[in-house]
Image: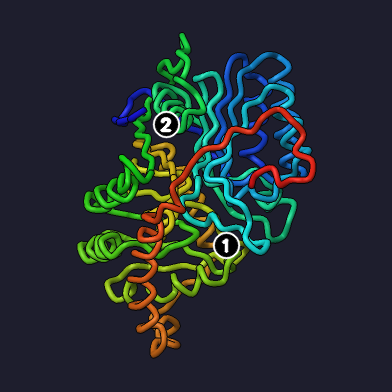
Amino acid sequence: MLVNFQWKENNEAEFLINGNQYFRSVFDCIRAARREILLETFIIFNDEVGKKLKEALLEAAARQVQIDITVDGYGTADLDSEFISELTDAGIRMHVYDPKPRLFGMRTNLFRRLHRKIVVVDGEVAYISGINFGADHLPDRYAMGKQDYGVRVRGPIVKDIRDAAGALLVEHQALKKLPELQGSSSAAGKAAMLMAIRDNNHHRNDIEAHYIRAIRSATSRLVIANAYFFPSYRLCHELRNAARRGVNVTLILQGRPDMPWARMFSSSLYSYMLQDGVKIYEYTERPLHGKIAIIDHDWSTVGSSNLDPLSLSLNLEANLFVRDAELNRQIHTHLEQLIDQSCKLITTEAAKKGRWWRTPLMIVSFHFLRHFPKRMGWLPVHAARLKTLSATTHSNKRALD
């Protein structure tokens, strides 16, 4: 099922900050579902968030709502059999992207990950985010809860988001076709939106290409908040070019990363970016997991794609690109608050510290990381598949192997 996306007019978007806003909205929407729920995510944990998700889904299944859940075989590898059986025994179809057995207790399916976070309900409401279904996305509850973002959308764009989720199921023969839904995706607002995905077949560079096109058009301001920032040379070059022509280019990156290597790789680019006037801030309150950006006064993007080799070269990703002044304003106001209250400015002097080892590290790791995932993805052992779990008890076996 090949999908080609175009800009769609007459949509509305609601900006959702962190798991407390996102989960509340998603769970309420699932509880109101009448016909269909499509859900894709990288991770579901059997914690307080996962249990609330399961409860809402079981209630919907009891109302005969058709439900398809797709999780990643690497990210959700530790979800227990009892949790899965409760869902499948209720008639919920659960699919695992690229399941692989463990080797010496280690997960082996690092590459070709389903990293998208999509929820579509009744073909009328959709969510795109970087937020997994886990309590580690509740920063109001936990000191090291992740800072992250999503959007709730209505309007014609919902059909494209639904088609993207359905295409994955059809491509891997989990569904013969996506059923038609009548009376959905009607005009809801004034925002223009474009659905963009990254896969390993037909949309290898779409998200990166949309970023580059928008950066080239920037005239006044450009703010990117991204968890794992180690982008392609082309994208780095376009950011520096924008700064040279007078655009106020600001990067908000991790200062308290959940994975220490993420800051190491990002910081190796600091001197390179700063020399042309790019401003860099590190967010220090908690781990930054967001993948959002604004350009000028009407362009925004929210989604699952980091600006790093895995997201741009190998993962399945989904971002929404939006032209809407109000959403742009909301995101800009929020990011300005982060900078004022929770970020430290990276100076040229600070970036030069340790430069004797950062320069060779940047050169070697940049080229290695940009090409290694793609090369590994060519190996037959990494040919991705989708496994549909049956409505049985997975007693002594890992359900997602």
The residue lying furthest to the bottom in this view is 356
In the picture, the disc for residue 171 is 2
Foreground: 301 or 308? 308
317, above or below 121, in the image:
below
The residue tagged 1 is: 341
Question: Residue 113's spot in the image, x, y percent?
Answer: 49, 49
Q: Can residue 19 be seen from the camera position used here?
A: no
Residue at 42% across, 78% down: 347
Residue 323: quarter of image: top left
Foreground: 232 or 110? 110
Left/right placement of residue 127 relative to residue 10 reads: right
Q: Secondary structure at mark 1?
A: helix
Q: Callout 2, which amino acid? A: Glu
Residue 170: quarter of image: top left
User: Which mark is nearer the camera, 2 or 1?
Assistant: 2
Foreground: 247 or 395? 395
Question: Residue 397's spot in the image, x, y percent?
Answer: 74, 45
Q: Residues within 10 Å of mark 1 (few under 14, many from 20)?
A: few
Q: Secondary structure at mark 2?
A: helix
Residue at 36% across, 62% down: 231
Quarter holding the N terminus is top left
199, above or below 343, in the image:
above
Question: Residue 91's spot in the image, x, y percent?
Answer: 68, 22
Residue at 53% across, 42% down: 97
Along the polypeptide, which appears first: circle 2 or circle 1?
2
Question: Residue 210's spot in the image, x, y percent?
Answer: 29, 46
Q: Callout 1, which amino acid? A: Gln
Q: Can residue 69 be seen from the camera position used here?
A: yes
